[in-house]
Amino acid sequence: MTSGWQRALPDMPAPPAARAWARISPPRRYEAQWRRLVEAALEQDLGPDALAETGLEPVAAAREWKPATVALYTKVARYGGLEIAQPRTPEPDPLTLDLKELTRIRSDGLEHLRTVAWCSLALGWPGTVGQFRGLRRDQVHATTRRLLVSTDDGEWAVPGALTAWHAWEAARDRFPSLAASPWVLPALRKGPGVNSHVGGQLSTQALQVTFAKHAVRTATAMQATAPPSRRPEVEALAAVYLTLSYDTYRRLALAAGTPPVAPRGAVRAKRSVSRAARLAGG
C-alpha cells in the first residue's frame, strides 16, 4: 500500500531507501518525472528522508542537472509531499540572443525540417513544449505573407515562418504516414511505447531532446562554415547553442517582445526585459 510521505520519527530508523520510495504514491500527471527522480535518488542511496534533508544538490551534482532541471524536479518532489525548498527558476542567460540561426534550413532531412519549422513558429507563437505537442495541422493556416495559428485562446499571426513551414509540409507529404498525421510535429519513427507509431504524437521528452539535438547540430554547422572575419562572434553564439533548451529559447523569444500565448515563462521574460533595460542604462 502506498501513501504520502511522512518523515520518520526521531527515534525510529528510516527504512531502506528503495522500500521507503515504494511506499509513496507518485503525484498525478507527474509519474514519469517522479520515476526519474526516484531512480536518481537511489543511485546515491538516498531515501525520501535523506533527500528532504540534503535537498537535490547531491543528485543534481551526480546527474549534472542544470538549474532549470533542478527547479523542475524540486517541484515534482514537493508535489509528492517531500519538504524541499523550491529554488527560483533561473532567468535566461544571456538575456538576449540571436535565435535566427535555428530557423535556417541547412538540409532536407525530415527531422531537421520539422525542428526548423517548430523554431520558426515559436518565434511568433512561443507556445510551451506541451502546447506544441498538441498543436494540430488544422490549427495552422498559411496565407501569402504569414502563418496564422488558431487555438481556443485566440489567433496569432506568425511572420517569417512561411519558408520553413512550406519546406516541412512538402517533405512530410512524400510519406503517407506523415501526410495523414494530424500533428504539426509528428513522430518520424516508432518509439519504445506500445502505442507509438510513425505520424503519432510525440512525447514531451522526445520534443525536448529533438530541440537540444537541433541546437547542437546548428552550433556545429555554424562553426564549420564561419568566415574568418566572423569567427569569434560565431564561436560565442555556438557556445550558447550547445547548451540551449527549448524552455530558454521560448523565454528569450518572449523577452525579445513576442506576445505570450501561455502564462508559463511570461513573468520571467518580463523580469529579463527589465533587467536588460537596467543594464543598458548603466
Image (spheres, rainbow, N blue to C red):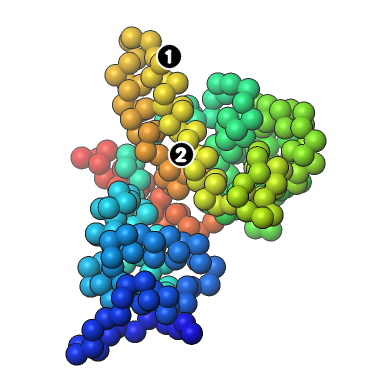
Which corner quadrant of the image does residue 12 belong to?
A: bottom left
Q: Label 1 neighbourhood size at 10 Å, few (<14), some (14-19), many (20+)?
A: few
The location of residue 267, given as percent across then percent down, is 41, 57
Counting every numbered tag in the picture gives 2
78 versus 105 height, above or below: below
Residue 212, labelled with which disc?
Answer: 2
Look at the image and tell me in which quarter the C terminus lies.
Answer: top left
Give me the C-alpha separation between circle 2 and circle 1. Answer: 20 Å
Q: What residue appears at the point 44 percent right and 54 percent down from the top-left corner?
A: 265
Q: What residue appears at the point 62 percent right and 53 percent down from the top-left corner?
A: 193
As drawn, is 271 to the left or to the right of 262?
A: left
Q: Residue furthest top?
A: 228
Disc 2 secondary structure class? helix
Look at label 2 and name its amino acid: Ala
The location of residue 237, given as percent across then percent down, is 36, 28
Which corner quadrant of the image does residue 216 belong to?
A: top left
Which corner quadrant of the image does residue 20 belong to?
A: bottom left
66 versus 229 height, above or below: below
Residue beneath disc 1: 225
Q: What residue appears at the point 77 percent right and 39 percent down from the top-left corner?
A: 177
Look at label 1 and name its amino acid: Thr
As drawn, is 1 to the left or to the right of 47?
A: right
The location of residue 161, given as percent across then percent down, is 62, 32
Disc 1 secondary structure class? helix
As drawn, is 147 to the left or to the right of 20?
A: right
Q: Label 2 neighbourhood size at 10 Å, few (<14), some (14-19), many (20+)?
A: some
